[in-house]
Image: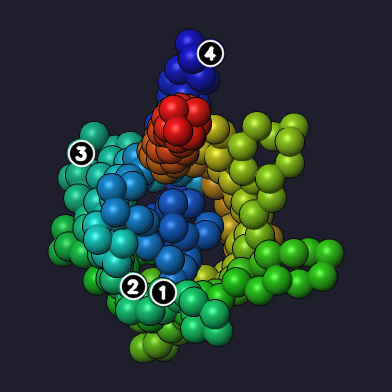
Amino acid sequence: MNRHLIFFCLLLSILLTFSSHVSGEIFTDSGLVDIPTGEVLKHGIFGVGVYAPFQNIKYFKRYPVAFRVNFGMFDRIEFGASHILPQDNDASRSFLGHVKAQLLNETGKIPNVAIGVDNLGDNVGQEWNTYHANSTYLVISKTFNLPRIHLISGHFGIGNHRFTFDESPIGLFAGVSIELHPAFARGDIGISLEFDGTGINAGVRHTADSGLQIALGVETLNKPEDTRYLVSISWTNAQMIEQIDAAKRLARQAAKLASQTKSKPTKENGKSEE
């Protein structure tokens, strides 16, 4: 636990020292690298973290680092908030909101369908040209069971502002993701590839059994001169809630077995008395 805390503090200090800007929240618990999906966090599930990219230039420019929190309600709605912390002491801080509502839940052939708004707020600095305010979107996600690959998810959406290219009023985004559960990882590994409306991004995220998430990504692979390397560290209570639910199920099963065991001698005693 102490080693995880030391690593968290070390990585956090690096993120605060060198960073560049991105278009929105990256590596959210229900999203891919930089695009949303049709999924939302379950009721009572939340995630908190910090994220920032590093641009491959000779001298690192100082751009905003962002802290974020996301939480789910009623298995249908997800709320989020970002605190953008500029490196320039003279720049104003910015607080942005995010909301996503799931219209359809994936069952059989029916996909996940969600609508949302990113970067709610009007205090976004003009120099943060990729943090487009009030970016609305509609996204569809579907999981497919393919031979050898097994479960793979596809995501397709339409949106405005941060999802658009140049002066286009509306843009398209898409992505694919797969989740692996190798024994050596002591957790889950998610791999994703996406097009966010302007660039191609790729990322990998490891979620430990403790809920600690570490993610690495590469942004704008289609433009080598603008390529950025993304880093995110966060924590979610999803694994903890899952472990609690599993313990409750085991307790109920144990109680049921104990009740059945107690009832058997009673029946046998009744027969012997006859």
Q: Residue at x 47, y 75 (%)?
A: 106
Of the residues tagged 3 and 4, which is closer to the observer?
4
- Residue 28 visible (yes or no): yes
| Pointer 1 local density, CA inside 10 Å: few below 14, some 14–19, many at least 20 | some
Instruction: Name the residue that disc number 4 marks.
Output: 3
Q: Amino acid at mark 2?
A: Gln
Tag 2 secondary structure: strand
Return the residue at label 3. 90
**Alpha carbons under labels 1 and 3: distance apart:** 45 Å
Mark 4 vs mark 1, foreground winner is: 1
Number of marks in the rendered image: 4
Point out the tag, 3 or 4, that comes first from the N-terminus.
4
Point 84% across, 64% down: residue: 148
Residue type at mark 1? Asn
Whole-angstrom CA distance, mark 1 to mark 2, is 7 Å
**Distance from the alpha carbon under mark 4 to that under mark 1:** 39 Å
Indicate left or right for 216 with 27 as reference. right
Q: Are marks 3 and 4 in contact (CB under 8 Å)?
A: no
Label 3, secondary structure: give it. loop
